[in-house]
Image: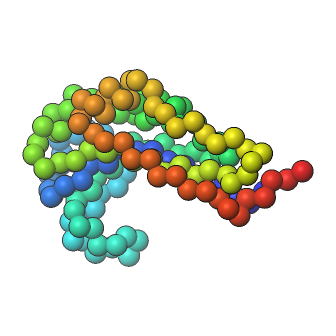
Amino acid sequence: MPDLEKSYMYLSIKGDFDPNDLITQVSLTPWKCLKKHSKSLQNKIPRCSIVNYGKVEVTSECPDLYQMSDELFRQLEPYRDELIALSKAPGLHFCCSTCLWMVHSLEVSTPPIGFHSDIVSLLGSLGASIDVDTYRDDEYIPLG
C-alpha cells in the first residue's frame, strides 16, 4: 500500500498583527507563526499574519474527525481563558482548520465529518469558523 497522507486539524488565528505581540498573550506555544508580507523558503508570502495553535495529525484510510476534534480540545482547553481574552481583540479571525485525506476506494468507508460538542463550544466562544478541506488519494489501490 502506498503511503497515506496525514490528515490534520489545528486552530489558526489570522489578521493584521505582529505575531510576536500575539504569542506573548497565550502561554501555549504555537507550532507555526508567519508575519504578514514575510518571505520564507517554505511558504508563499502571506497576505496576513498567521499563528497556529494545537495540531492533531493522523494517518488513516478513514480518519475520525470526532477523535481528532477531541484531541484538539484537550490541547486547547487548558488555555481557554487566554484564547477567549485574545479573541476579543479587533481584527483577529479564529478558524479550526482541517485537512482530511480520504482513500478513493469503494472498499474503504468515507469518514464521518463531525465535531464533538466540547470543541464546538470552545470554537463558538472564540467566534471561530470551521474549515474542512477534503482530498482524495486517487493513487491508492487496495490490496487483496
Residue visible at 24% across and 71% down?
Answer: 38
Residue 135 picture quarter:
bottom right
Residue visible at 21% across and 71% down?
Answer: 37
Q: Residue furthest left?
A: 90
Q: Residue furthest top?
A: 117
Instruction: Give percent across and percent down for residue 69.
Output: 46, 34
* Quadrant into which the N terminus falls: bottom right
Horizontal side of 78 relative to 137 (left or right) equals left
Instruction: Give percent across and percent down for residue 90.
Output: 10, 45
Residue 49 picture quarter:
bottom left
Residue visible at 26% across and 44% down?
Answer: 94
Q: Residue furthest right?
A: 144
Q: How many marks?
A: 0
Residue visible at 39% across and 24% down?
Answer: 118
**Is residue 2 in sight in this rendering?**
yes
Q: Residue furthest front?
A: 106
Horizontal side of 5 relative to 48 (left or right) equals right
Instruction: Give percent across and percent down for residue 143.
Output: 85, 53
